[in-house]
Image (cartoon, rainbow, N blue to C red):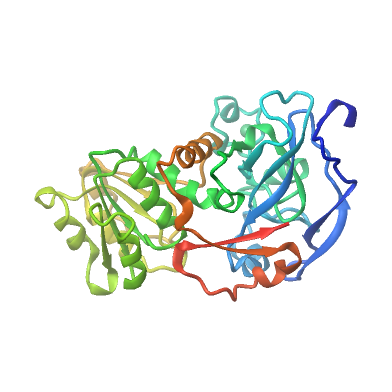
Amino acid sequence: MNESVAMATSAIPETMKAARMHKIGGELIIEDLPVPKPGSLDVLVRVRSCGIVPNLGNILSNWPTWFPHMPQPPLPAIFGLDPAGEVAAVGELVHGIKPGDRVYLNPGRSCGSCRHCRRGDGLSCQHYAFQGYFGFSKHAMQTFKDYDTGGLGEYMVAPASAVVSLPDNMPFDHAARLGYMGTGYSALKKAGVGPTDTLLVNGISGTLGISCAVFGLALGAKKILGTGRDKKLLAEIKALAPDRIEVFSINDGPLDTWARSHTQNGEGVDVFIDCNGPGTSHEPFLQGIKAMRRGATAVDIGAVMGEVALDVHYLMDNNMRLIGSAWFNTHEGQEMADMVGSGIVDFSILETHATPLSGVNEAISGIAARHGGFSNFVIHP
Ligand SMILES: [Zn+2]
């Protein structure tokens, strides 16, 4: 394989440092492992920054209990969801990407050959899985076999089709946030947000909510109505665009009355995006539905858990849509990177906390103080 792979000018070592989990609940162990070899349609990337959530250790330990239908990679495994770095080598059939290119790798893997993949809809593939994290069905196990490296190592391999090219003004640490940014961005795209829309975002000061604020502004939303609890954080969100963002603490009453008061004749919002996470009460979600105008669209990306008591008759009568949206596609990733490149959006609002690979266990243990969605936790392998 090596002679058919275009190599970077700097020599690629035989081995690399990577953090692997050997047993559920155990610490990640830093090991010397062989540098993976790219297949003919793959890229090998020298990872410089990998985004993490600060309680990743807790998630990895409890995942099989919480979500037994969504498998993790077989152990020992290198986890790490949101990697960015430089291309070190490309497979013999890769012609649009070259060693030295600065990239983000969309971890969303699909099979590439089923009817959904062949029409460019990899998110609908039965094999869909997050490389270095988890899958959505038993079919993900094949995906993990095909791509068995994650971002918590010096090198990883991914298909060339997963590459998002980074503009020069986008640091790797900001690119390592594209996953969570993309989840919000894709929701806005699915709802068709544009200049005539008033947008309601529940949980706007969190990791997903900030994405909806940043990209809602970039897509031209007329007004963004954000809810949360922490008034200090909400004020910081409003400061991003004081003329276009209004905020409300759900401790102060029902959010639907407030949201409607900010729409023309009180008719309701055009788009409602719920970013509240698992464990949140259903009430803010249901009030968000009540805040919608006739014909409006709701998108859930926060994953409120359990059976929400939703009156679907009301949705039908009012010609409303409710969409579940998971992650984003690589093209949407490129759109976000290009918007950073042209200055339409600015990720400098992120406060990055970087940890070397040697400190990975402390970084994922969840002790870090968090400044809402402004905090950006990354590992530098
Ligand atoms: Zn497929």
Which residue lies most toward the left here?
A: 265
Q: On the rendered structure, is 272 left or right of 337? A: left
Residue 123, position as x, y percentages in the image: 55, 38
Q: Tell me where residue 204 sits by quadrant.
A: bottom left
Q: Is residue 183 visible?
A: yes
Residue 149, position as x, y percentages in the image: 75, 48
Ligand 1 shown in quarter = top right
Of 104 and 239, nearer the camera is: 239
Q: Against 315, is 232 above or below?
A: below
Q: Is residue 305 visible?
A: no
Residue 198, position as x, y percentages in the image: 24, 47
Q: Tell me where residue 195 sits by quadrant.
A: top left
Q: Against 367, is 340 above or below?
A: above
Q: Quadrant of the C terminus?
A: bottom right
Instruction: Tell me the residue at 61%/42% (across/down).
Output: 106
Of 303 and 165, nearer the camera is: 165
Q: Quadrant of the N terminus?
A: top right
Of 327 and 73, nearer the camera is: 327
Q: On the rendered structure, is 253 left or right of 112? A: left
Counting the numbered discs, the total is 0
Residue 80, position as x, y percentages in the image: 67, 55
Of 227 and 305, nearer the camera is: 227
